[in-house]
Amino acid sequence: MRTHPKPDISDVSEVAEIDGGSTPPRAEEELLEALRRGDEASFAALIQMHHTMLLRIARMYLRDQSVAEDVVQETWLGFLESLDRFEGRASIKTWIYRILVNTAKKRLRRDGRSIPFSSLGDRLDGPAEPSVDPDRFRGPEDKWPHHWLNAPADWSGLPENRLVSNETVGVAERAIDSLAPAQREVITLRDIEGWTSDEVCNVLGITDTNQRVLLHRARSKVRRELEKYFDETESA
C-alpha cells in the first residue's frame, strides 16, 4: 500500500473556528490528489467546511461534548488513513460523514452503551403510525367521509416575529429532541442542515423510501407540537 505524508491535525479545533459552508473551488479530483500529497492547506479548507457540522452530528450520538470532539478527531484521522481506499464513487463529503457515523457507533460499543441508531438500516424506526390523528377526519358515515373535520392550522397570518421567536424555535427543538432516533437524525440533516435526500441516504445507508417516511413522520410530529403551542398561546 502506498503511504502519503499526512497533514498535521493537532490543531483541528483552531482551524475549524470558521465554517466555510461551501464547496471548494477546486475539483474533487484535484482536492483528493492534493490531500494524498499531504497538502495541509487543502486539508485545512476541508476542515473549515465540515468540522462544525461533524461535531453537531456527533452530538446526536454522543451527548458528552468532549467525547463527541474525540470522535470527530478520530473521524479526521480515519479519513486521512483511508485516502488510498477512496475510489471516488461517492463524494468526499459523503465519505467523511460515513466515517463519522461508523466511528460514533464504534465509540458507543466501546463505552458499553446501546446504539440508538442501529435501526437505521432497512426497517423504519418505530411502529407504523398515522401521520395525522384519525379523529381529525370525518367518519365513513359522514356526508363527506374522510374529509377534514379539523383542518391543519393556517399560520400564514401569524406575525413573522412570532414564527421565528426564541420560544417558537425552542418548541420545535424540543419536539425534534423527543423524536425516535432515526426520525430525529433524518429531520435534522434534511431540514436543519439542508442536506439532499441522496446525501442522507448515502451517509446513513437507508433507502430513499425509508428516508421519505422517516422525514414525513418527523415533520408531522413537530407540526403537531407547534399546533398545540400556537393553540394554547392563542387561547391564553
Image (cartoon, rainbow, N blue to C red):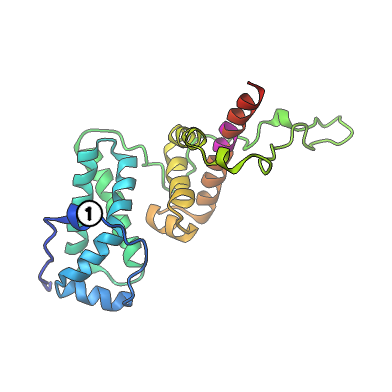
State the residue in front, 128 or 96.
96
* Residue 3 placement (x, y as % from top left): 10, 71
Q: Dot 1 lies on which element?
A: helix
Find disc 1 in the rendering and name its residue: 75
In the image, which residues are magenta?
221-225
Magenta region, mostly helix, strand or loop?
Answer: helix
Can residue 68 be seen in this snapshot?
A: yes
Can residue 84 be seen in this snapshot?
A: no
- Residue 87 appears left or right of 7: right
Q: Count the marks: how many?
A: 1
- Residue 140 appears left or right of 212: right
Residue drawn 54% across the image and 50% down it: 212
Residue 48: name its quadrant: bottom left
State the residue in front, 221 or 231.
231
**Residue sticking out furthest to the top:** 236
- Residue 230 appears left or right of 95: right
Question: From the viewer's perspective, is residue 68 above or below residue 86?
Answer: above
Amino acid type of the residue tagged 1 in the rendering:
Thr
* Residue 24 placement (x, y as % from top left): 32, 71
Residue drawn 29% across the image and 72% down it: 87
* Residue 70 placement (x, y as % from top left): 18, 45
The quarter of the image holding the C terminus is: top right
- Residue 3 appears left or right of 100: left
State the residue in front, 169 or 65.
169
* Residue 199 placement (x, y as % from top left): 43, 59
Label 1 crowd bin: few (<14), some (14–19), many (20+), radius 10 Å: many
State the residue in front, 138 or 158.
158
Please check the rendered image and state whether residue 95 is part of the magenta-colored stretch, yes or no. no
Residue 95: name its quadrant: bottom left
The quarter of the image holding the N terminus is: bottom left
